[in-house]
Image (cartoon, grey):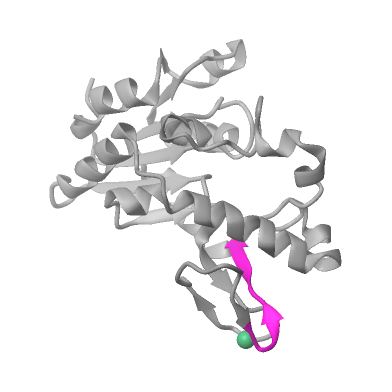
Amino acid sequence: MKAADFRHVIVLTGAGISASAGIRTFRGPGGLWTDPELAALSHHDAMVAKREAVCAMYWQRRRGLAKVAPTVAHRALAAFEAARPTGTTFTLVTQNVDGLHRAAGNRDVVEYHGSLARWRCDACPHTEEPPDGEAPPVHCGVVMRPEIVMFGEGIPPAAEHAVKRALRDCDLFVAIGTSGTVSPASGFVRAARYAGAKTVLLNLEAFDEARELFDDVRLGPSDERVPALFA
Ligand SMILES: [Zn+2]
């Protein structure tokens, strides 16, 4: 089976696709949120109470990402999008805020949890992709914040709408680098099945629940599994 055999393909990527790039994940073993001090800064309440510290933490993380290159798996998905024939669709949804899909060349990316590349002012509607610097940018006299979804914040309506529409029409759904058993992946796979799509999970490991949710589970590093399916 090849992804190219399907007309309407939707892919959801999670932290696993960026693992070989050397990015420390937020959740999971060794993830940033297992550090209680950092975890406390990941909630919306912290953005309200200690805005400067929270924005500075994300700014340092963004600076670190500038030195990271997309993986083999990211590049395989970019090549897949570029080769899609007329009349087919490809919707790439990511939970990652690292911007690596766009860096790899994917043009149409639904950043479900936002991106550390974009920063916004909370005093006016201004957003930008700021250049590198020692400290986070300031606008209207207030430090800007990353346009990411923190714990306690909602998914951007435009992203949610794009995903719902794609899931309704898809004939192939692939989850990559995520367990597949927690939201949003678990909800996406159920919606894709309801639409009659074939569902595939590419991940390092799989729980029994994932084997029940997905038609096809392929274990292994995404740098091997993704190019094989999206060649
Ligand atoms: Zn402003």
Q: Quadrant of the N terminus?
A: top left
For the image, the number of numbered tags is: 0
Magenta stretch containing residue 143, yes or no?
yes
Judge from the rendering whether residue 73 lies leftward or rightward of residue 142; answer left or right.
Answer: left
The residues colored magenta run: 139-147
Q: Closest to the observer: 185 or 136?
A: 136
Residue reaching furthest to the top:
208
Residue reaching furthest to the front:
134
Q: Closest to the observer: 194 or 230?
A: 230
Name which residue lies at 52% across and 69% down: 133
Using the rendered image of the protein, determine whether residue 113 is visible from the camera's viewpoint.
Answer: no
Q: Quadrant of the C terminus?
A: top left
Residue reaching furthest to the right:
49
Judge from the rendering whether residue 191 lies leftward or rightward of residue 30; answer left or right.
Answer: left
- Spot occupied by residue 121 in the image (x, y as percentages of width and height): 63, 79
Name which residue lies at 47% across and 29% down: 177
Name which residue lies at 55% across and 35% down: 185
Q: Closest to the observer: 80 or 189?
A: 80
- Magenta span: chief secondary structure: strand
Quadrant field for ligand 1? bottom right
Where, by quadrant of the figure, is residue 146 drawn? bottom right
Judge from the rendering whether residue 26 lies leftward or rightward of residue 227; answer left or right.
Answer: right
The relative height of residue 28 versus residue 208 in the rendered view (above or below) is: below
Magenta stretch containing residue 92, yes or no?
no
The relative height of residue 170 versus residue 156 in the rendered view (above or below) is: above
Using the rendered image of the protein, determine whether residue 114 is visible from the camera's viewpoint.
Answer: yes
- Spot occupied by residue 114 in the image (x, y as percentages of width and height): 54, 57
- Spot occupied by residue 202 in the image (x, y as percentages of width and height): 41, 23
The relative height of residue 69 versus residue 205 in the rendered view (above or below) is: below
- Spot occupied by residue 150 in the image (x, y as percentages of width and height): 69, 54
Where, by quadrant of the figure, is residue 80 drawn? top left
Name which residue lies at 39% across and 48% down: 100
